[in-house]
Image: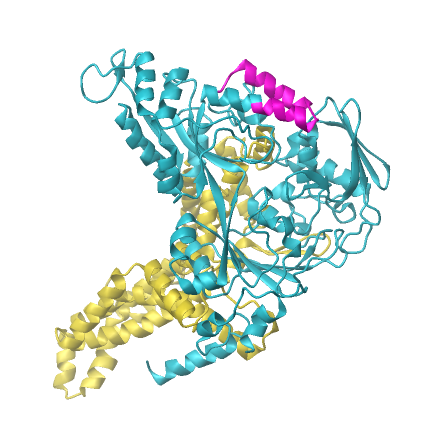
Amino acid sequence: MFKYLIKRVLWMIPMLIGISLISFFIMHLAPGDITNNEASFNPKASEESRQKLREMYNLDKPIIVQYGLWLKRMMTLDFGKSFASHQKPVFWQTTDADGNVTEGLIQQALPITLMINLLGLTITLSLAIPLGIIAARKYQGWQDRSITLFNFIGFSIPGFWLSLLLMYWLGVVNNWFPISGMHSLNYDSLDTWDKIKDTFSHLFLPVVIPSITGLAGITLFVKNGMLDVLQQDYITTARAKGLGEHKVVYTHALRNALLPLITIIGLSIPGLIGGSVIAETIFAIPGMGKLFYDAVLMRDFPVVMGILTIGSALTLVGNLLADVAYAWADPRVRRGVAKA
Amino acid sequence: MSPLLLNLNTAICLSLTLLVAGCNAPNEKQYQIDYTTQFPQVSGGTLINAMTGEPSGLISMIAGESASSAISSNIFNSLLKYDKNLELEGDLVAHWEISTDQKTITFKLKPNLKWADNNPLTSADVLFTWQAVTNEKNASPYASDFLLVKKAETPDAQTFRVTYEQAYAPALDSWAGLQILPKHLLEGKDLHTTAFARKPIGSHYYQLDSWKHGEHLKLSKNANSVLGPAQIDNLVTRIIPDNSAQFLELMADNIDLMGLDPIKYSRIIPARPELQKKLALYKELGNSYTYMGFNLKHKPFDDVRVRRAINYAIDKQEIIDGVYLGLGINIASPYKPGTRWSNPALTPYPYDPAKARSLLKEAGFTDSNGDGILERDGKPFSFEIITNQNKEREKSAVLIQRRLKEVGIDVQIRAIEWASFISRFIKTGDFDVVVLGWGLGLDPDQYNIWHSSQQAPGQFNFIGYNNPKVDKLLEQGRLELNPDRRMEVYHQFSATLLEDSPIIYLSAGYGLTAIHKRVKGIDDPAPPAGIGHNSQDWYIPKSLRRNEISAH
């Protein structure tokens, strides 16, 4: 087991280099660079100054040299500085000679996105698992049908449209929730309890809406897993032993039915840090999705590469963790009887 | 709704003290306030504003984007500024003198100027700022105007003198655009990375109080303001990237001010009495216009008859009415109508398809195979309009496509993402026709756009315009500092440009703004400089401020 783990971790290094190489080249294949943004299309701004900027950022060098420079920095885990944004550090804060701390872009955006997505995932799971179980137990009954209907309505509604409607209804017509942003303007003067309430009310819509629209997939997953398991012989055995229905379903069936969820959660780890451009834009949340999107439009290569590298590293780690968790949860995998 | 949720609502409601104006049907309460009554001018209060993008930093000579200068112009002064009628006046400067050979300008600073941190503001700061903007290492996009200064000197702490190689008329405008930075805080620092960009010290009406990344910037009054105190205590700018969300915030009374698009201005707000009651709408002409430009190096656009024919074939009023809902005007010169640089004798090309047809025939285009599309030398007259992904420009292109089809020209349209648009098509000159816009400064010099020497990749005469007469006028206009003689030059320039028709002016759109009626002291109708020219005198009467309203 330990040897296997070491092997897997070592394998991640060439994989990461490969991923970074491909993303670096794809990014540079896109036409234009940081000096082509809309603000620079100004007759007052001269081409010479744009050329100087290109030299400053090494954009005038051949792409393979640029990749080499980037890789060299990455060896020391230096993600570099953004081209835009007054050259803020991409990943983590730096301190200048006068003791001024400049926070990194990912450092600022990641906790926000992580918090929203973790809350969202928790809500989704805590709704999807019970709903999936009910739907499986009452398969083809009215409960199953109405859960399926509800899920598909949620799945089919465009998130941004539902968001705007709810913002209008809950924020403008009724004034129950704030419309956008992370905090009230007077946040700093609130006491701790009010700060929690303030954050909660601001996060309510951005967390709840994606969890409702994301409910359908996981509910179906749980339901199908449950249906499969409930038809297995050992469930019949359990029932034949005279175990109560509650014990059969929740102790014997559920644990096995939830096994595939491990894979889903493992796969959702990169999604947790990805964030959603649309939701973050509508709700004015400075998260990872918006950061990445703006960086692509600006051709801010260090930021794009930083996010892609961290994202792919986390994907690999997520897969590894899912496999390990599988081995831990399923004795057949652990003993090499069945493949994960 | 469950009792739990109800309690939740009450709890949240109680916690939102500042933003929410009381929770028991707050909207109805506000409708009862009569915003039209007269209130005495008092200082204080907070104005909340919204922006779609966050500034990268507040040193605008480096940042370059409009979000940055929108904030930094409240924090920093320039040597000169424009008054409400767009004439230059002193900002940091008490008076200035131009030497008889027009090559030297001497600025005399106002006495006893101070930075917000109490250090004196002297000519050394001005010299430092000039050195910074021209320093190669800083790669400022605005360096070119200032690189023309041959010598800059500070005879004493109040005096700053610049000498140009030859007379340079846009110089005064350039000094109105350069925000003066404090030498004592920036000397020896790298302007691209200095923390000063995120906590600046300036000299203007406001100083930065706090900046919450991705959320808001708060400015508060600068006690040392070189132009005296502003009325409103705090300016808060919230960062709300989505326009619809911004509008919802405006409706819910959480922001006071927002730029509008034509639909919101002329359809949505007028249709809602509750919004009309609390929002005042303003429109002002900006210094910008939308145009259709030809690649003059491609056939058949090198033929002036073809360009004029297309100009006659396009119904500009239809574009203004259809795309901008009437909130724009038809122009005949590249200057803002009503300013001295705009030539009042010129009239735009009228919509005249018959004339267009005869001009095209004159140029050798006939429909020889009867398919409705004109041909010359067996080749059909067909081209592609490219534009960036901008709704108004795309819609304008569609209307143009239809009108040109009527005179027998086949047009395709392609909208392209900005960076690709510039690097793949504009820089390489690989296009037939573009629909784009120019947003211009207040100085009439447009050398960079029209002079034949400005055609290299990345320069701004990308349509390849080359007319020796215009070249000469543009050179002359740069040398002439006398405003009246200079005006003559640019009137001639606009007339030639209109005759040549290298671009077709489609429309100059109005800038549209909604401001909550609690904000008083705004000039309506807007003077030539726009409503913002006296924003330091805007005030919010005590009884209309947010806290007071919620205390009712």
Residue occupying image coordinates x 36% and y 85%? B3
Residue A72 x, y percent position in the rendering: 55, 42
Residue B276 location (% of width, % of height): 45, 61
Q: Height in image: B118 above or below A240?
A: above
The chain whose colour is yellow is A
Where residue B345 sits: x, y (%)?
52, 26
Residue B456, image x and y in percent?
52, 22
Furthest toward the right, the residue is B156
Quarter of the picture containing the N terminus of chain B is bottom left
User: B518 or B5, which is in the foreground?
Assistant: B518
Residue for point 65% across, 46% down: B59
Span highlighted in magenta in the image: B465-491
Between A298 and B158, the one lying in front of the other is B158
Q: Main secondary structure of the magenta part?
A: helix
Q: In this view, does B108 lie to the left or right of A143?
A: right
Residue A243 forms part of the magenta stretch:
no
Residue A237 appears in the picture as rendered? yes
Is residue B182 placed above or below B13 in the rendered structure? above
Q: Which chain is cyan?
A: B
